Image (cartoon, rainbow, N blue to C red):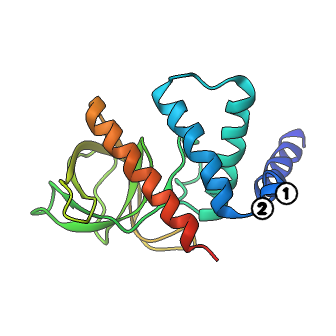
């Protein structure tokens, strides 16, 4: 019963806005981005209150954007996934082009009618658009949704592997750009 009470408390807190004085989504995104940048870069490290605020904002934004959820029993993510429609080319299936449903510094959800099996390694080429150089990353399939359902489209949740510093910085910029764009598009 205690677990159910805890779950209900968590659910209620996710549905509440983190700070009623800053109820506008663009303001919350603007507050989240520099905290997230400091969290990923570690300079200067976030204080305990800042980390708590980052967590609160991340939970609100995850709920608000409805990022693709892992299957039941999946682990909680360490970073915010943001909605995006970036194009990605995979090394499997003859270089199939797909869309990224969402993206984070640690992974993404790739929409695909033919998702690969969990633990399958692959290479991705993410097209940031605007004629910019594609970002090439190694990844591994962590989970699969074979059929579209109320949680999202068919596809696969992937985790990036062995991301070098320069690629991580470019990936962080893509995530921030997608977050700011999603914050502007939202009604």
Whether residue 114 appears in this view of the structure is yes
Q: Is residue 75 visible?
A: no
What residue is shown at x 54% (from left), y 48% (from top)?
80
Mark 2 and mark 1: Cα distance apart in space: 5 Å
Quadrant placement of the C terminus: bottom right
Q: Quadrant of the N terminus?
A: top right
**Horizontal placement of 57 versus 21: left or right?**
left
Residue 41 in the image: state x and y as whole percent.
46, 28
For the point 43% across and 72% down, the residue is 147
Q: In this view, does 126 lie to the left or right of 58?
A: left
Instruction: Give neighbour class at mark 2: few <14, some 14-19, many 20+ (Cα, 10 Å).
Output: few
Which is nearer the eye, 179 or 30? 30
Is residue 8 left or right of 56 when viewed as pictured? right
Q: Mark 2 points at which residue?
A: 23
Q: Label 1, on which residue?
A: 20
Asked whether the residues under the numbered discs 2 and 1 touch, taking CB atoms below 8 Å apart as contact, a structural biologist would say yes
**In the figure, 91 relative to 41: above or below?**
below
Q: Nearer the viewer, residue 116 or 183?
A: 183
Q: Give the quadrant of residue 95.
A: bottom left
Kind of element beneath mark 2: loop
The disc at residue 7 is none
The answer to which image quadrant residue 98 occupies is bottom left
Residue visible at 72% across and 38% down?
Answer: 53
Find residue 145 and report its horizontal and vertical position in percent: 43, 63
């Amino acid at each position: 019963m205690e677990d159910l009470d805890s779950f209900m408390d968590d659910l209620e807190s996710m549905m509440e806005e983190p700070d009623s004085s800053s109820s506008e989504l663009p303001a919350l995104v603007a507050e989240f981005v520099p905290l997230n940048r400091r969290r990923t870069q570690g300079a200067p490290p976030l204080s305990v209150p800042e980390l708590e605020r980052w967590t609160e904002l991340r939970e609100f934004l995850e709920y608000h954007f409805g990022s693709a959820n892992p299957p039941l029993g999946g682990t909680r993510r360490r970073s915010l996934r943001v909605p995006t429609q970036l194009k990605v080319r995979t090394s499997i299936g003859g270089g199939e082009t797909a869309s990224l449903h969402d993206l984070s510094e640690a992974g993404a959800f790739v929409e695909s009618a033919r998702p690969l099996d969990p633990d399958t390694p692959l290479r991705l080429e993410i097209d940031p658009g605007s004629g910019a150089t594609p970002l090439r990353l190694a990844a591994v399939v962590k989970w699969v949704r074979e059929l579209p359902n109320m949680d999202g489209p068919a596809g696969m949740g992937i985790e990036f592997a062995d991301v070098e510093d320069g690629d991580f910085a470019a990936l962080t910029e893509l995530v921030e750009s997608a977050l700011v764009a999603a914050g502007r598009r939202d009604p």
